[in-house]
Image (cartoon, rainbow, N blue to C red):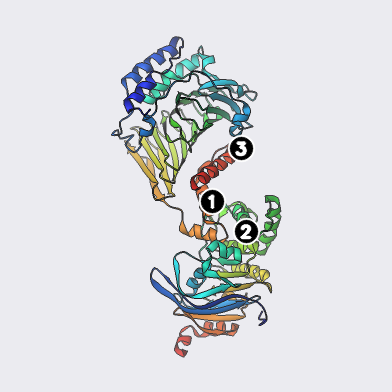
């Protein structure tokens, strides 16, 4: 049965209400009221005009009513051996698939459900992601089943891997991953958010993450969206970076029929450094949209951004990167670059770098390029004996590698390299 | 080394080719046997670089007439990668940079592709490492170049040495060096020339396409051909190159 946009939204509002206590229940209720008042964004909305959500609207997504049991072998290829691992299956924490033995005294990692009495959680949760304005964030804030609480107080050497697995069900399901991270002063950690689907399921993963970096905290945030090809993924991440802190993000979008990732980083205190790298690789009829917003609201901030998009088949890549330098943010140094590779005649990429500067005494640069596989490089590789397809794959892989190689987790870099090759092979045959 | 009994590698007859609708080659004839070193000289626009690109199968160039037979195979019926597998190698005048592909990965992929297409055994990374370390010595290259992206940030001389490294690894039957001497200082020229000389054998052959006689002091040709107006207008031995150096190309035109 195909639904209208309104019917799809109403169906989502009928989701299973999850009971909480105290402050969290208040936030859930508040979010539900907002979700009821809001709706899916209009395609006339400036932030959504390039992104066709119509494939999403056709499905009636139902809440998860029972929980699938997976074994470790089912998710083997996604595991990062050296990591602290929390696994969520269809939005629900799985203690038996998780691996917490490497958690030391530098970090608290747990499911949100276990930490409802934690005042640190209460003072931060829901304060950063805009559930008042954004329908997807509001839906998540009301309906999330469980989530992750990460509280870093010192240097954590093992990467923290949050693996969200979606399974195949009879009905299309809505899943709401949720994560709250607080990095205390001078703490360091690497966070890997990983969204995967198994068995070719149709589902809607609507994820929200909030991250707070206090003074001199240092975070490397890797986000991998490799959902199943029939899935839908809408993700939002709000980050607040404190004085002299460093936030380094690498976000990858490979999967899902339609996906959108919104990353909002706000520099509220002096001297923070922000580095955002992104890669979207889409083929077939996929749509991948990445929206980023960096707000420099305090002096001496630095931001560097490189976003790449590769589109094959009749896929559509969208990038919108806005950098706002607020009044008073003197000495801001910002550079943004959008580089794009079109692999077929029917593929399409829209890129919109935007700068809004309300201050003198700043240095801001941005640029965008869209190109095809370099004909000279292709001929060179063929002249060394490589077949056309193999040469094209190598060049595409190389274009992607510049982003993937920045990920500070070697085993993940290796497995993602394979993912790319698999995706490209599937596309070409 | 000229040996009239050795095998014909390449036989080009009355080759005509154009790029963008402009006729550049207007009937080139050339025969190359194993063990031979040829130099093709000529002024800019004479067609010598076009000739090398046409032989390698560059897609911008269209063959409009004539034939080229490579060890008995019709060269123009083969794709560029098939020509490589047949044993043809072009050292590029302007080597491309390929960010994100390491030199060692490219060399191994190319080597193993040729091996498997020829039904020979591929080498695993460790075995290949041994092979490539040997070949590095041919062009006096530092092993650190293997881990770097292909030609990215290389100097002009390093790029040309990298081309010869590829030649050393792939061991072609016929190597065409397209202005490999251009942009080289004297030390780099000597290294590249020593590398090429060490790769010469009675079973392979080299064609040097060059503007200047300088390279020929180091790699001594058996034949020197002069191209002009899309044809080979004069063929001689190494002394022809010296004469050209002394008297310029105009002398040849006036004589013709």
Chain holding disc 3: A
C-alpha gap between disc 1 and disc 2: 18 Å
Chain holding disc 1: A
Q: Nearer the viewer, mark 1 or mark 3?
A: 1
Checking the image for residue B167, the label placed there is: none
For the residues labelled 2 and 3, say whether their Cβ atoms are less than 8 Å apart: no
Checking the image for residue A394, the label placed there is: 1
Quick check: can you spot residue B160?
Answer: no
Q: Nearer the viewer, mark 1 or mark 2?
A: 2
For the residues labelled 1 and 3, say whether their Cβ atoms are less than 8 Å apart: no
C-alpha gap between disc 1 and disc 3: 20 Å
Determine which residue is flagged by label 3.
Answer: A411
Checking the image for residue B117, the label placed there is: 2
**Would you place residue A374 above or below residue B216 in this image?**
above
Q: Nearer the viewer, residue A409 or B51?
A: B51
Location of residue A68 (image quadrant): top right
């Amino acid at each position: 049965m195909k639904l209208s946009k309104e019917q799809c939204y109403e169906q989502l509002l009928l989701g299973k209400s999850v009971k909480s206590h105290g402050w969290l229940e208040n936030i859930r209720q508040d979010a539900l009221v907002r979700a009821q008042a809001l709706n899916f964004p209009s395609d006339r909305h400036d932030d959504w005009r390039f992104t066709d959500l119509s494939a999403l609207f056709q499905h009636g997504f139902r809440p998860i009513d029972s929980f699938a049991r997976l074994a470790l072998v089912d998710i083997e290829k996604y595991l990062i051996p050296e990591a602290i691992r929390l696994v969520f299956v269809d939005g629900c924490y799985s203690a038996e698939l998780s691996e917490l033995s490497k958690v030391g005294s530098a970090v608290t990692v747990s499911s949100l459900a276990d930490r409802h009495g934690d005042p640190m959680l209460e003072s931060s949760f829901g304060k950063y992601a805009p559930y008042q304005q954004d329908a997807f964030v509001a839906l998540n804030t009301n309906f999330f089943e469980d989530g992750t609480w990460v509280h870093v107080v010192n240097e954590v050497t093992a990467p923290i891997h949050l693996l969200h697995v979606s399974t195949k069900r009879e009905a299309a399901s809505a899943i709401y991953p949720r994560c709250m991270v607080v990095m205390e002063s001078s703490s360091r950690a690497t966070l890997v958010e990983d969204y995967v689907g198994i068995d070719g399921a149709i589902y809607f993963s609507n994820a929200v993450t909030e991250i707070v970096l206090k003074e001199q905290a240092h975070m490397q945030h890797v986000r991998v969206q490799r959902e199943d090809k029939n899935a839908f993924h809408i993700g939002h991440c709000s980050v607040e970076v404190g004085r002299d802190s460093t936030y380094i993000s690498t976000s990858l979008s490979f999967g899902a029929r339609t996906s959108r990732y919104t990353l909002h980083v706000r520099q509220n205190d002096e001297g923070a450094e922000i580095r955002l790298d992104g890669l979207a690789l889409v083929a077939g009829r996929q749509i991948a949209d990445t929206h980023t917003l960096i707000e420099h609201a305090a002096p001496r901030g630095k931001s560097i951004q490189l976003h790449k998009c590769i589109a094959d088949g009749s896929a559509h890549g969208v990038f919108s990167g806005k950098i706002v330098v607020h009044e008073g943010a003197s000495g801001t140094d910002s550079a943004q670059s959008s580089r794009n590779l079109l692999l077929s005649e029917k593929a399409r990429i829209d890129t919109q770098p935007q700068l809004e500067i309300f201050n003198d005494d700043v240095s801001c640069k941005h640029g965008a390029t869209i190109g095809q596989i370099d004909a000279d490089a292709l001929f060179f590789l063929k002249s060394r004996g490589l077949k056309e397809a193999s040469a094209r794959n190598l060049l595409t892989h190389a274009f992607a590698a510049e982003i993937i190689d920045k990920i500070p987790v070697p085993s993940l870099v290796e497995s993602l390299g394979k993912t790319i090759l698999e995706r490209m092979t599937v596309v070409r045959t | 080394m000229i040996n009239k009994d050795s095998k014909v590698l390449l036989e080009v007859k009355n080759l005509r080719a154009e790029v963008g609708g402009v006729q550049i080659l207007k009937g080139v004839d050339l025969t190359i046997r194993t063990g031979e070193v040829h130099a093709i000289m000529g002024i800019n626009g004479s067609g010598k670089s076009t000739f090398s690109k046409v032989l390698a199968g560059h897609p911008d160039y269209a063959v409009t007439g004539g034939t080229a037979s490579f060890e008995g195979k019709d060269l123009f019926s083969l794709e560029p990668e098939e020509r490589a597998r047949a044993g043809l190698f072009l050292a590029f005048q302007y080597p491309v940079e390929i960010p994100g592909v390491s030199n060692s990965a490219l060399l191994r992929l190319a080597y193993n592709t040729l091996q498997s297409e020829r039904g020979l055994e591929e080498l695993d990374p460790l075995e290949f490492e041994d092979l490539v370390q040997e070949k590095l010595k041919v062009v006096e290259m530092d092993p650190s170049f293997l881990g770097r992206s292909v030609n990215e940030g290389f100097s002009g001389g390093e790029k040309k040495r990298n081309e010869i490294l590829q030649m050393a690894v792939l061991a072609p039957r016929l190597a065409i060096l397209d202005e490999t001497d251009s942009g080289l200082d004297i030390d780099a020229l000597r290294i590249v020339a020593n590398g090429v000389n060490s790769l010469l054998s009675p079973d392979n052959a080299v064609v040097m396409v060059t503007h200047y006689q300088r390279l020929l002091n180091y790699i001594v040709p058996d034949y020197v051909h002069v191209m002009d107006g899309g044809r080979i207008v004069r063929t001689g031995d190494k002394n022809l190159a010296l004469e050209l150096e002394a008297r310029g190309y105009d002398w040849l035109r006036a004589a013709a």
